[in-house]
Image (cartoon, rainbow, N blue to C red):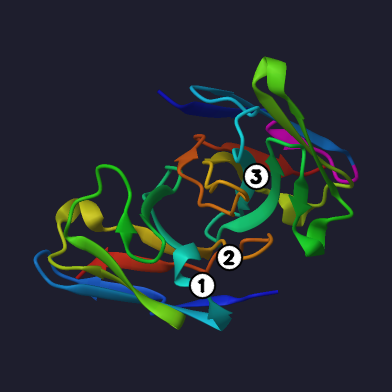
Amino acid sequence: QITLKESGPTLVKPTQTLTLTCSFSGFSLSTRGVGVGWIRQPPGKALQWLALIYWDDDKHYSPSLKSKLTVTKDTSRNQVVLTVTNMDPIDTATYYCARSPPNCGSGSCYPNTFDMWGQGTMVTVSS
Amino acid sequence: ELVLTQSPGTLSLSPGERATLSCRASQSINSHYLAWYQQKPGQAPRLLIYGASSRSTDIPDRFSGSGSGTDFTLTISRVEPEDFAVYHCQHYWNSPPNTFGQGTRLEIK
């Protein structure tokens, strides 16, 4: 059974750095082609793709937020960490992590959907 | 950056009716890399359709996806009460960012 769960502060002040941890089970980030992504959703608004880290430590970021985001993995602990610097009230949102399953042929691996999601964690930015 | 535009913003239907939701891309994408998700209030999104037309695990066959190029459709053949939710499309073609559409809300008429 695959599960993911986000953890971190529920309230941060403007200009602070947010650190969120995604703890997962039922799969390994050392498996070829697997990725873990971060997506957020401001209240009542659309999903926003933030970042994705793959099994081989390949990392991708939303261009508009690249300067604020860092994603890292700890394969042995089955965790992925997202840091968001210089938090602003517009960063108030529910933050989700999700698994991107492997999609590999004999040679290359290809992008994939998010097939399993965490429950999400609501983060409010306010002084 | 590729933009996905979903329409309508809100769709009001009665149970038993047919639902047709649209997702239009700002540039042509490989249909192998278009997904649909369902999101109910207070819950995380759930993968419904991947590769534009393949149902994910345990998704009822009243849900179907179609389309190619820039125009994609999610169809619910007969809407059940549990289907009232927000539906999101997402592309995952080429390198990230793999953007989402703004969502279509399916509400009870």
Rendered position, B78 above or below A33: below
Q: Dot 1 surroundings within 10 Å: few (below 14), some, or many (20 or more)?
A: some
Q: How many labels sit on residues? A: 3
Question: Which label's residue is closer to the chain start, 1 or 2?
Answer: 1
Disc 3 designates what residue? A38
User: Residue A17 in the image: x percent, y percent?
Assistant: 86, 38
Asked which secondary structure carries label 2, the reply is: loop
Outermost residue on the left side: it is B16
> Within the image, what quadrant is residue A78 found in?
top right
Disc 1 designates what residue? B30
Q: Nearer the viewer, residue B88 or A16?
A: B88
> Are the residues flagged by discs 2 and 3 in contact, CB closer than 8 Å?
no
User: Residue A31 in the image: x percent, y percent?
Assistant: 60, 30
Q: Chain of mark 2?
A: B
> Are the residues flagged by discs 1 and 2 in contact, CB closer than 8 Å?
yes
Same subunit, labels 2 and 3: the answer reads no
In this view of the protein, can residue B63 be seen by the observer? yes
Q: Specify the quadrant that holds the N terminus of chain B.
A: bottom right
Q: Say if the magenta span includes residue A10.
A: yes
Q: Please, what is the three-letter code of the amino acid marked with disc 3?
A: Trp
Kindly report the secondary structure that dominates the magenta region of the rendered protein.
loop
Left or right relative to B35: residue B17: left
User: Residue A53 in the image: x percent, y percent?
Assistant: 71, 42
Q: Chain of mark 3?
A: A
Q: Dot 3 surroundings within 10 Å: few (below 14), some, or many (20 or more)?
A: many
Q: Which residues are magenta?
A: A9-15
Disc 2 designates what residue? B93
